[in-house]
Image (spheres, coloured by chain):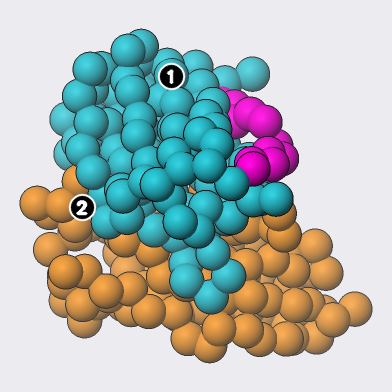
Chain colours: A cyan, B orange
Amino acid sequence: DGGITQSPKYLFRKEGQNVTLSCEQNLNHDAMYWYRQDPGQGLRLIYYSQIVNDFQKGDIAEGYSVSREKKESFPLTVTSAQKNPTAFYLCASSIGLGVSGNTEAFFGQGTRLTVV
Amino acid sequence: KQEVTQIPAALSVPEGENLVLNCSFTDSAIYNLQWFRQDPGKGLTSLLLIQSSQREQTSGRLNASLDKSSGRSTLYIAASQPGDSATYLCAVLTYGNNRLAFGKGNQVVVIP
């Protein structure tokens, strides 16, 4: 099946730890995105990548890092510098803006991160 | 900066009624607008994508319209069913901004 796979579904982090959330897609999409979802706040963009080996900060990048070494993979690391990491994290992908207008975004099933 | 608003935040309708969900946005220079569905604790499922040159899109019981000049989109769900209970989000992709801007969603409950 084609789609976006996020793992793990649930993740627990101790204070001061770095954790990495996995996102893999087999849709052959160029663009990939990471969002954070908090109750009452909607989705906020953390990082995005339009092409392999390139990525840009979104609106709330502080305390997070990403890499894009392969087209199909876009892992997100939540570092100890992120003061309030408990949230639901969503990964998405799309063809990218090279095809004008036809940039339907598809999402994974999310990872719920909890600080313990 | 593109601002997307969805009102009301929550609504309940009896089964069989038509659902009408509204989305407004402040910058009309958009590539497209997309409607999503989200079930509790799950990811987003794409429902409909309307490109800026289109006025509406239809899929089964779902119909979405787009009035770009007035910055509005409406999602119609005909003959609602309890399985339509979910949160519906709209998002726009704006020229010069390589990211989707999301509304906070309409939480819908269809009462059997």
Q: Position of residue A94 (x, y in %)?
A: 36, 34
Amino acid type, label 2: Tyr
Q: Mark on residue B31?
A: 2
Judged left or right of residue B96, residue A37 is: right
Q: Nearer the viewer, residue A3 or B41?
A: B41
- Chief secondary structure of the magenta portion: strand
Chain under disc 2: B
Q: Position of residue A11 (x, y in %)?
A: 68, 39
Q: CA distance from mark 2 to mark 1?
A: 26 Å
Q: Mark on residue A15?
A: none
Within 10 Å of disc 2 (Cα), the crowding (few <14, some 14-19, many 20+) is: many
Indicate the secondary structure of the residue bearing disc 1: loop
The quarter holding residue B102 reads bottom left
Q: Is residue B96 visible?
A: yes
Identify whether B23 is placed above or below A105.
below
Report the residue at 42% width, 16% height from top: A72
Within 10 Å of disc 1 (Cα), the crowding (few <14, some 14-19, many 20+) is: some
Q: Is residue A94 visible?
A: no
Residue at the limit of the structure toward the left, as seen here: B96
Residue at the limit of the structure toward the right, as seen here: B112
Amino acid type, label 1: Ser
Chain under disc 1: A
Q: Mark on residue A73?
A: 1
Judged left or right of residue B73, residue B77 is: right
Identify whether A57 is placed above or below B101.
above
The quarter holding residue A50 reads top left
Q: Which residues are magenta?
A: A3-14
Identify whether A52 is placed above or below B56.
above
Q: Is residue B67 magenta?
A: no
Q: Quadrant of the N terminus of chain A?
A: top right
**Nearer the camera: disc 2 or disc 1:** 1
Report the residue at 31% width, 48% height from top: A61
